Amino acid sequence: MARSTTGGDGGTGTAAGSASGGGPGTAVPERLLAEATRLFAERGYDRTSVQEIVEAAGVTKGALYHYFGSKDDLLHEIYARVLRLQTERLDAIAAREGDVRERLADAAADVVVTSIQNLDDTKIFFRSMHQLSPEKQKAVRAERRRYHERFRSLVEEGQRDGHFRPGLRPDLVVDFFFGSVHHLGTWYHADGPLSAEQVATEFSDLLLHSVRQP
């Protein structure tokens, strides 16, 4: 039943303009983010200096601080841009007319594909999130919570319509599903046997089968 709404070849770092977009003709903020993503993935956030980032991007420290106030601003934006993309896409899917089962299937498939397309970004962030300032951590958690609440509303709509089992706790359904999505970075490889679309279809079908009314 799942139909992913995001095109992709299973590669990483494409949907939100991450590590693949750092060429000389790219705008300075995108170059900085691309090189920061690459270096954080290769060396780790702690072991990457601001000087290394600006040299790799071919800009000055002044240029970096013009767009980003600190190194942790770069870390924050690496993940925030992926979350913004996923939120925009979820809002569009959820707002469509039609069967809620199809919309939930598409939403589930979409978050899997966009997570895989930006796997370096999400891996870096979850590995280093604790190094953000408390204020930035709080802001990110609030944005993620809003995203999960929008996703949960589709489960609740399906329950009201009689398509999904009424005894399910929608919050636990969402936590269970996104636990699997956030785990993708520990096992998925672009050169492995499954494409992003194949994983998305499997995850989406598993979700739909778990909530549907017998």
Image (tube, rainbow, N blue to C red):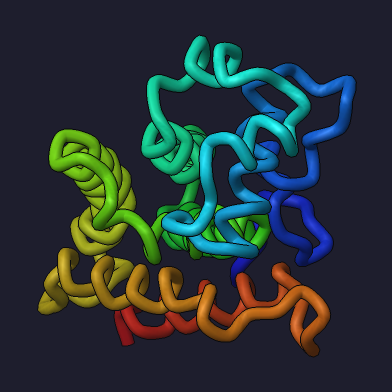
Note whether 96 is above or below 7 in the view shown: above
Looking at the rendered image, the quarter that the N terminus falls into is bottom right
Left or right: 112 in relation to 179? right
**The quadrant where residue 195 appears:** bottom right
| Residue 118 picture location, percent across and down | 62, 54
The quadrant in which the C terminus is found is bottom left
- Residue at position x 49%, y 58% in the image: 47
Question: Is 190 situated above or below 115?
Answer: below
**Among the 4 quarters of the image, the one containing residue 135:** top left
Q: Between 146 and 138, which is closer to the camera in this rendering?
A: 138
Location of residue 152 (image quadrant): bottom left
Task: Give the image location of residue 57, x and y in percent.
Answer: 73, 31
Is 175 located above or below residue 3 in the figure? below
Residue 213, above or below 143: below
Which residue is drawn at the image coordinates 86% and 32% (left, top)? 23
169 and 179: which is toward the camera: 179
| Residue 158 in the image, given as x and y percentages of width and height | 29, 60
Residue 12 shows in this picture: yes
The residue at the point 72 percent across, 46 percent down is 19
List x then y, in percent, for residue 146: 24, 41
Give whichever of 27, 97 is nearer the camera.
27
Left or right: where 121 falls relative to 23: left
Residue at the (44%, 42%) spot, across then down: 75
User: Can residue 87 be seen in the rendering of this structure?
Assistant: no
- The number of discs equals 0
